[in-house]
Image (cartoon, rainbow, N blue to C red):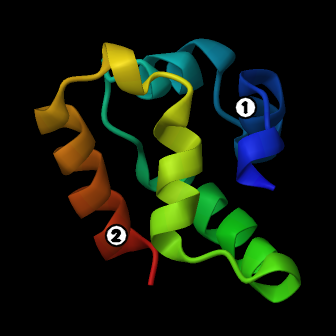
Amino acid sequence: MLNKLTVTQLAELSKLSKAYISQVKNGKRPPSEKLIQTLRQLDNNSNRNNGHDVNKAIELFLRTRRDGISPKTITFYRSYLSKAIP
């Protein structure tokens, strides 16, 4: 599910702005607790239906901008989101 979401759809689901979601995807801002909770809920729904694991969800969320994000930022997101998404 996460790999099929657009910035607009994720903004609507999380009740956060498209600009903020875009900044997170571009590595300019860290994800908020509200965004992490939304991703956790989407991941839980995906786990029930598709067997996706946390690393897969994180990878899908960041994939579209990986080339533009530094390895340090990717490491930060993996660490931060892994703690938030059981």
Q: Farthest residue to the front: give it.
A: 67
In-image side of 54 versus 46 (left or right)? left
- Residue 21 in the image: x percent, y percent? 56, 26
Q: What kind of residue is marked 1?
A: Ala
Q: Is residue 43 above or below residue 4?
A: below
Position in image of residue 50 (x %, y %): 82, 78
In primary-sequence order, the first of circles 1 and 2 is 1
Residue displayed at 65% across by 22% down: 17
Badge 2 crowding class, 10 Å Cα cut-off, few under 14, some 14 to 19, many 20 or more, is some
Quarter of the figure with the N terminus: bottom right
Amino acid bearing label 2: Ser
* Residue occupying the far left of the picture: 72
Looking at the picture, does residue 3 appear above or below residue 79?
Answer: above
The residue under label 2 is 82
Secondary structure, mark 2, is: helix
Q: At 44% from the left edge and 84% from the top edge, which residue is drawn?
A: 86
Q: Residue furthest right?
A: 49
Instruction: Give the residue number, with chain letter if any, for mark 1.
Output: 11
Task: Assess disc 1: are there few (<14), some (14-19) or many (≥20) residues with their C-alpha within 10 Å of its C-alpha.
Answer: some
Circle nearer the viewer, 1 or 2:
2
Does the CB distance between marks 1 and 2 fall below 8 Å?
Answer: no
Q: Tell me the residue at 80%/23% (across/down).
A: 8
> Residue at left 40%, top 41%?
31
Residue 79, above or below 5: below
Where residue 64 sits, quadrant-wise, is top right
x and y percentages locating residue 4 in the rendered image: 82, 41
Foreground pick, 80 / 4: 4
Residue 67: x and y in percent read 36, 18
